[in-house]
Amino acid sequence: MSAPERRRALVTGAASGIGAGAARRLLGGGVEVLATDIDRRGLAALSELGAETLIVDLADLRDRDRVIEAAVGVDYLVQAAGIIRLLPIEKVTVEDWRDVFAVNAEAMFFLCQGIGATMPAGGAIVNLSSSSAKLANTTEAAVYAASKSAVLSITRSFAYSLAPIPVRVNAICPGIIDTPMQDAVLEQVSAIRGMTPEQLSDLRETSVPLGRGASPDEIAELIWFLLSDGAGYMTGQAVNFDGGLVTW
């Protein structure tokens, strides 16, 4: 990606996992990064690499406003913030639904709205969805999956809305990525199903044609591409990054 002087990006959920990988890749490419998360310790590592950091809870409306104000005029927006609740589907509560959607869908919508309109021509947004938006086999993550399906609709809507600027908006649907959230899935879902985390991990990886998961640094390369001029004719797309787990 050509990185003109003073290009700036906002990365949410930047303290760990995919968000941290994206922030590191952008910093390495000469882009100034505003990294946000609720995790102070995780953000400290990015601060040492040169990122500006902002500790926020995206479920909090006032904190969302702080992020939007701090990110006025950024060239790039990477929305990696997300939470998951892992429960048997019959035990999901209204509170679980609202808590997950507040971060995974509602915050994403309003950050696209508030930040997207201030982005310069040639700007780009990448929203992190999930392969679970297209699959239903992990029913313990049903609310998370529903929120990630909403991300795809949000992405399409803002791709149309922001095209006249032009600002491009795309989504990525990751599969098995080595992140703290993935560790939580293995630990909690295996307990619900009466398996060991190792057994569940083996079961999940055998369902992937390429036979493995991926690292945050690998998916960061796709994020870098989608933000770049090389992807200048792509908008409104949902790109699978899952080793062949989903092919539609």
Image: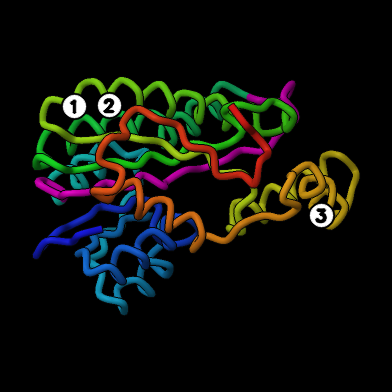
Q: Nearer the viewer, residue 62 or 111?
A: 111
Circle 2 Cα neighbour tier, 10 Å, few/some/many (<14 / 14–19 / ≥20): many
Q: Identity of the amino acid at label 1?
A: Ala
Q: Secondary structure at mark 2?
A: helix
Residue ID for mark 1: 163
Name the residue: 84% across, 46% down: 203
Specify whether residue 91 is painted magenta: yes
Viewer-nearest residue: 132 or 146: 132
> Dot 3, how many residues are within 10 Å of its Cα: few (below 14), some (14-19), or many (20+)?
some
Disc assigned to residue 197: 3
At label 3, the amino acid type is Pro
Q: Name the disc covering residue 159, or none.
A: 2
Q: Nearer the viewer, residue 15 or 208?
A: 208
How far from the left and from the top, in percent, is residue 168?
A: 25, 35
Nearest-to-viewer mark from 3 and 2? 2
CB under 8 Å between callouts 3 and 1? no
Magenta segment, prevailing SS (helix, strand or loop) = loop
Q: Give the image's coloring scheme.
A: rainbow
Write the start and end of the magenta stretch as one range: 71-92
Q: Is residue 244 above or below residue 47?
A: above
